[in-house]
Amino acid sequence: RGSLQDRSVNAAQMEGCMHGELDVVYGTLQDLERRENVKIDLLICCGDFQSVRNEEDLKSLNCPPNYRKMNSFHKYYSGDLIAPFPTIFIGGNHEASNYLWE
């Protein structure tokens, strides 16, 4: 076993609801890697991930209309941006269910 300071240690990061704000979460975790000199190998999101690709997904998002926002998931889905970590999510109660049914 190594310490968190040992970059050879595999580390998974757990995150609560991301609400489609992948840019914010990924940026925060990349800052953490630099500050703490650790390597994050996997991100697990437990809660509202909100994989909204387009306006149609936004309409199916299970939340009050005033909380519906595109946020940044669509940039990763389209390939405009690449996630810095493999990301697994377990959906919450505020998801774009039409996409998840596909």
Image (tube, rainbow, N blue to C red):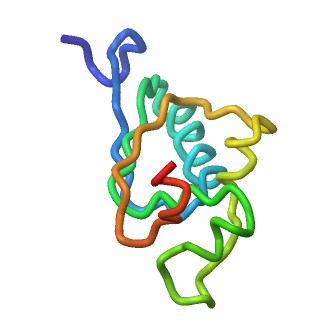
Residue 20 on image: x %, y %: 58, 60
Looking at the image, which is closer to me, 91 or 85? 91
Residue 18 on image: x %, y %: 49, 59
Looking at the image, which is closer to me, 99 or 26? 99
Taking 10 as reference, is 80 left or right?
Answer: right
Q: Residue at x 44, y 28 (%)?
A: 40
Residue 63 on image: x %, y %: 49, 82
Residue 89 on image: x %, y %: 40, 46
Residue 92 falls in which quadrant of the image? bottom left
Q: Residue at x 34, y 26 (%)?
A: 11
Outermost residue on the right side: it is 80
Looking at the image, which is closer to me, 4 or 12? 12
Outermost residue on the front side: it is 102
Q: Quadrant of the N terminus?
A: top left
- Up/down of 45 relative to 5, above or below: below
What count of labels does the image hold? 0
Taking 9 as reference, is 83 left or right?
Answer: right
- Up/down of 1 relative to 32, above or below: above
Looking at the image, which is closer to me, 37 or 80? 80
Q: Residue at x 55, y 55 (%)?
A: 99
